[in-house]
Image: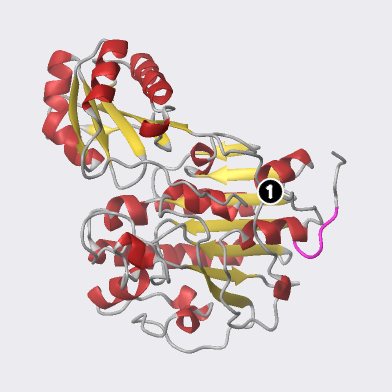
Amino acid sequence: MSNNQNYKKFKRIFVLVMDSVGIGYDDTSYKYNDEGANTWVHTSKQCNGLNIPTLNSLGLYDLDNNILGTSKVSHPHSYVCKAKEESVGKDTMTGHWEMMGIKTTEPFVTFTDTGFPKELIDELEKRTGHKIIGNCAASGTEIIKQLGEQQMKDNSLIVYTSADSVLQIAASEEVTGLEELYRCCEIARELCMDPKYRVGRVIARPFVGTNKDNFKRTPNRHDLALKPPHETVMNVLKNNHLEVNCIGKISDIFDGYGVSKTTKTISNSNGMEITIKEANNKEFDKGLCFINLVEFDSEYGHRRNPIGYGKAIEQFDKELDVLIKNLKDDDLLIITADHGNDPTWHGTDHTREKVPFIIYSKLFNDGKLLDERTSFADIGATVLYNFELDKPSNLIGKPIKELF
């Protein structure tokens, strides 16, 4: 393709995903037993109101006036709206893939309630040469406390899952070793290509320490994800020599497909710190910066901790203020989510919810509430429209033309 240097209004677009921070159930939520869920509202009520002046100034109240801590304000520099998910499911991959134009019609397989089938575990033991322990849905930090000492004693593998479509394998870096853990995960990924076991990601979860009181996961996590079924908005950008700069687990979600640069994170705050640095990076001149902040989901949503969830939102709000002050006049910032994870809801699963689109630029002067969008993919379509690139016919989404 040709080297496209055109853009309508914005040289850089930052898409920032507050992982799991949904804004209310949709008309399909009953299929998932999620009718009534609302991550934003229920979190705010459990916290007796949120201290979020930055998000409030951007018009969050217009999206749901039941969010305690928000108020009606004029927000000329930001447009806001809700968006429904067009894909089936309510997981990480379908949400992020849809943002970049892919409609998922067959949900990924989950094993949250049952653990993995015996025949899969037996084959994994046979192929890896290690005994498998665990095989349940669990918090990653909790399961290594419970089973880490046994894992180290017999050099077994701790296999566990979550509400997402994942098979995770935890093992000691000192006893099992990283290379061996990664080898075993490669085998698991191969086995899980079978449609009946088709999980979205196999994840290596190495840890260090000598006993349950000092076990700690390391930054050497390694994700083996399914590649998207075809090119996404990210590929179109990269093919046209535009930067696709990914922060957090974005590259893992897309299996590196369409990614120019990736930076891993260790926390939400670390992710925001890296994003602020990219906003000031003179070498990042044009293109997309795609960020995932996972801790809302992993640390608080799945653990049904609304107070912790609220505090994480308040901390993000402070860091968001710093990011906005570091954006250039011709930057666009889109704050969104990939699904819900109402920390007051039953179980530990994600919740099927609409997501917010909070869209900020210093160039806007007439910001307001927009009509609800019918797909998360309108984000990717807007990115292509801005850079004057044609959207491939196999991608979904419509650009938000009010921004231009």
The image quarter containing residue 403 is: bottom right
The image quarter containing residue 11 is: bottom right
Q: Which residue is mark 1?
A: 394
Can you give x and y, in whole percent of width and height, for residue 107 in the image? 43, 47
Magenta part, dominant SS: loop
Q: Residues within 10 Å of mark 1 (few under 14, many from 20)?
A: few
Can you give x and y, in whole percent of width and height, for residue 134 in the image? 17, 30
Is 10 included in the stretch rendered in magenta?
A: yes
Residue found farthest to the right: 2
At 56% from the left and 52% from the top, the residue drawn is 103
At 33% from the left and 82% from the top, the residue drawn is 68
> From the viewer's perspective, is residue 215 above or below residue 253?
above
Dot 1: element: loop
Q: Nearer the viewer, residue 240 or 192?
A: 192
Tally the marks: 1
Amino acid tagged 1: Asn
Can you give x and y, in whole percent of width and height, for residue 336 in the image? 51, 63
Horizontal side of 13 relative to 52 (left or right) equals right
Quarter in which the N terminus is drawn? top right
Is 157 included in the stretch rendered in magenta?
A: no
Quarter in which the C terminus is drawn? bottom right
Q: Nearer the viewer, residue 118 or 25?
A: 118
The image quarter containing residue 128 is: top left
Using the rendered image of the protein, determine whether residue 312 is visible from the camera's viewpoint.
yes
Horizontal side of 261 relative to 202 (left or right) equals right
Horizontal side of 168 relative to 328 (left or right) equals left
Using the rendered image of the protein, determine whether residue 214 is visible from the camera's viewpoint.
no
Please give the range of residues in magenta.
Answer: 6-11
At 60% from the left and 58% from the top, the residue drawn is 377
Can you give x and y, in whole percent of width and height, for residue 260 in the image? 66, 37
